[in-house]
Image: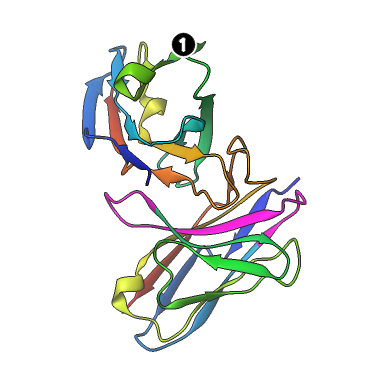
Amino acid sequence: AQKVTQAQTEISVVEKEDVTLDCVYETRDTTYYLFWYKQPPSGELVFLIRRNSFDEQNEISGRYSWNFQKSTSSFNFTITASQVVDSAVYFCALKVTGANSKLTFGKGITLSVRP
Amino acid sequence: NAGVTQTPKFRILKIGQSMTLQCTQDMNHNYMYWYRQDPGMGLKLIYYSVGAGITDKGEVPNGYNVSRSTTEDFPLRLELAAPSQTSVYFCASSPGQWSGANVLTFGAGSRLTVL
């Protein structure tokens, strides 16, 4: 069975601070995909990134960066110089290969960025 | 391109009433899903479908039914609504499932309250 743990439930930072959202996953499969989704106050779920288990390169996209470490089963997300618009709930998710596999979500981290 | 469209956005039901949440996608995706989101609990899969005429249960199917008569539509029916079904419901779709790589596209959500 797959499991995603987002131990942080709520984080509050002041604008321009850097913030890291933690994600730890569990799976026995060797091939899997990890995702981050953002849910702003408007409620929709927005895809941010996908990473497969064979690619441990860190990814940077503007102020966003992701650190994937198989040794610690972690896929952490860092926002540099946070902005008020980053305020949202962020979900980490895991999916293994196979016709019947499902996307397993963590419980989400609520990030509040104060001006 | 509308993506995934859910209706209604909001609904209040009385205990014991029934209703159908509508979901339609225009991306010709084979796979469709229904999730529910409860505060602090992440997203839980209710039902999913791998193609027209084929549906299967997710983690929390009790109290719900689905059908998939066309590729585009995947309605979720609540029979005998209960307060425990108060939640935000998300419909999603993806091109395929097996590889695990496919990104889910979500609808905007439907907020249901059962009183």
Identify the image quadrant of residue A13: top left
Say which quadrant the N terminus of chain B sits in.
top right
Q: Mark 1 falls within which chain?
A: A
Q: Is residue A96 left or right of residue B32?
A: left
Identify the image quadrant of residue A97: top right
| Of the pair B58 and A66, the residue shown nearer to us | B58
Circle 1 packing at 10 Å, graded few (<14), some (14-19), many (20+), is few
* Tally of numbered tags: 1
**Relative vertical location of residue A48 with respect to residue B50 in this rendering, above or below:** above
| Of the pair A58 and B90, the residue shown nearer to us | A58
Instruction: Provide the residue designation for mark 1.
Output: A58
Looking at the rendering, the stretch of residues picked out in magenta corresponds to B24-43
Q: Is residue A39 left or right of residue B97?
A: left
The x and y percentages for residue B49 are 62, 62
Give the color scheme: rainbow, by chain, secondary structure or one colour.
rainbow
Q: Is residue B26 magenta?
A: yes
Q: Determine the residue positioned at 73% across, 66% down.
A: B52
SS at circle 1 = loop
Instruction: Indicate the amino acid at tag 1.
Output: Asn
Q: Determine the residue positioned at 31% across, 44% down.
A: A107
The x and y percentages for residue B81 are 39, 82
Answer yes or no: is residue A96 visible.
yes
Q: Determine the residue positioned at 29% across, 36% down.
A: A109
Q: Determine the residue positioned at 61% across, 70% down.
A: B75
**Relative vertical location of residue B92 with respect to residue A31 in this rendering, above or below:** below
Q: Is residue B70 left or right of residue B99?
A: right
The x and y percentages for residue A3 are 34, 42
| Of the pair B110 and B82, the residue shown nearer to us | B82
Q: Is residue B69 left or right of residue B78?
A: right
Answer yes or no: is residue A39 visible.
no
